[in-house]
Amino acid sequence: MDPRYAPPRRSLHGGGLAEGENGRADGDRREIAALWRKIYNMPDAFPVDPDFDRLFADGDRLRIGNLDVKVMLSPGHTLGSITYVVGDAIFAHDTLMQPDAGTARADFPGGDAGQLYDSIMAILDHPDDYRIFIGHDYGTKDRDEPAWESTVGEQKANNIHVGGGRPKDEYVRLRKERDKTLPLPDRMLAALQVNLRGGRLPEPEGDGHSYFKIPANKF
């Protein structure tokens, strides 16, 4: 979503907002907010409690209508990434990509390739016929059509980064080498300031307009 047109998600969905934490009292969401306050040099920005009604801990369960949802903390791409398991469907956000594309990057602030590997292994510990729905797909040099669904078995056998039983140390080396070649995503530093506020733009300034603060030489 273009942050210029981002209404609060609470008004879009009619319910509370929730985000991942790690089970400690402070939670990963608070660590993420503190990390980005330092990066943006905005010490009072991104309070958690006003924008998020509940911080999920690893292993929490919730219900969406008649559906039972299990929450898995899946750090590596970011500190507080979470996976949802609903029946035989795994919503794996930024961990796995399609098997022909590999895995998410792990070089953002708070990211860690070793943690990402562990998170992926926990996802792939489910039965082989469980379906995996990914958060992003950019295609490959051999595939232009978008794709979004695979299975645990397909990922374990064919994922170009972790398939075939690739060991952790080899994956970490591959992931770090790959990440060194990737540019910072367009608009990420602006979009994060909306995400960290639960979908809100920054508070309007004296002229009635909201502004983003962008580090000029940190990345």
Image: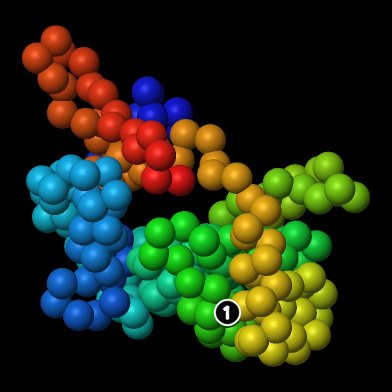
**Image point (26%, 24%), residue name:** 211
Residue 63 in the image: state x and y as whole percent: 33, 68
**Image point (90%, 50%), residue name:** 142
Q: Is residue 17 visible?
A: no
Question: Pointer 1: residues within 10 angstroms few (<14), some, or many (20+)?
Answer: many
**Image point (45%, 28%), residue name:** 2
Q: Amino acid at mark 1?
A: Tyr
Looking at the image, which is closer to me, 41 or 106? 41
Q: Is residue 39 visible?
A: yes
Question: Is 66 located above or below residue 53 in the figure?
Answer: below
Residue 11 in the image: state x and y as whole percent: 25, 35
**Image point (69%, 89%), residue name:** 167
Residue 110 in the image: state x and y as whole percent: 39, 65
Q: How is the image coloured?
A: rainbow
The quadrant where residue 81 appears: bottom left
Question: Is 11 located above or below residue 205 in the figure?
Answer: below
Residue positioned most to the right: 142
Looking at the image, which is closer to me, 44 or 47? 44
Left or right of 5? Residue 133 is right
Question: Is 61 located above or below residue 167 in the figure?
Answer: above
Reading the image, the residue beneath label 1 is: 117
Left or right of 124? Residue 6 is left
Residue positioned most to the top: 207
The quadrant where residue 95 appears: bottom right
Residue 33 in the image: state x and y as whole percent: 23, 56
Question: Is 92 located above or below residue 44 in the figure?
Answer: below
Residue at disc 1, secondary structure:
helix
The number of callouts visible is 1
Left or right of 113? Residue 42 is left
